[in-house]
Image: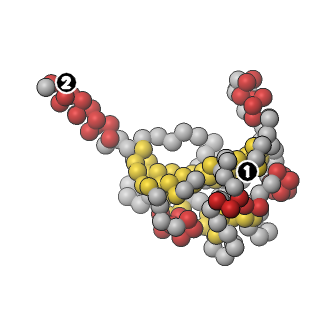
Amino acid sequence: MRACLLIALISATLSGCAHVSRIDVGPLTAFGEPPGQTDTQLYYLIRLDARGLPSGKLPPLALQLSKTKSPVPVDALTPDLAAQYLPRFVPPPQWPDTWKSKAREHPSFQGGGFYIGFDDSGLGFVSLCSHCHGGRQEPALCSADGSVCHVLPLTREQLRELTGPPDRIRKVREVTY
C-alpha cells in the first residue's frame, strides 16, 4: 500500500511540473510557455514534420522568409527556393562526425528563426523558433495566401487562426530541439 501511495505522490508531483503547452494539428506541433507570471501561453517553437507527406497533405501555410517579399507557401518549398532566402545549415563543431555526415546528406537551411530540411522525397522538416539557440528571432507564419501573418511567439488564438482547431493539447515537462 505504501508503494502505491508513494507512486501516486511522485506522479502528482511530477505532473505538476508540466508547464509547457504542446499543441498538435496534423503534422504540425507547437510548444508554448507562459511568459513571466501570466497564464497566457505564447508559442515560440513550431515544427512541421513533412517527411513522407505528399504536398497535398501539407497544412495550408506560408513562411515569411523575407520582410520585403511575399510569403512562400510551404507546399512550394524546394532546396533552390530555400537557398534564395536562407544560408545552408552548417552542423555545429561539437556534433559527433556521424551526425555531421548525416546532416550533410540532404540540403537544409537555417536562419532568422527558420530551419528547413529536405530529404529524398522533398520537404522533410520545417521549424520556426523565436527563442532558440540563445537569441531572439522573429520568424513569421502565414496563411497559405499570405493574407494573415503572425510573428512568433504566437498566442493560442493566433495559432488557431492559422492552423484551425487543434487535434490535441497537452502539457509536457520539456521540449527537445
The label on residue 3 is 2
119 is higher (above) or lower (below) than 27: above
The residue under label 2 is which amino acid type? Ala
The answer to whether 169 appears left or right of 67 in the picture is left
Name the quarter where the N terminus is drawn. top left
Q: Residue at x 67, y 48 (%)?
A: 52
The residue under label 1 is which amino acid type? Leu
From the viewer's side, name the closer residue of 37 and 131.
131
Task: Work out whether mark 1 precedes mark 2 in sequence or the reverse, and give the earlier one.
Answer: 2
Q: Which residue is drawn at 69% across and 72% down?
A: 146
Residue 60, percent from left and from top: 64, 66
Visible residue check, residue 128: yes
Visible residue check, residue 74: no
Cα separation between marks 1 and 2: 49 Å
The answer to whether 10 appears left or right of 2 in the picture is right
Residue 12, percent from left and from top: 26, 39
The label on residue 123 is 1
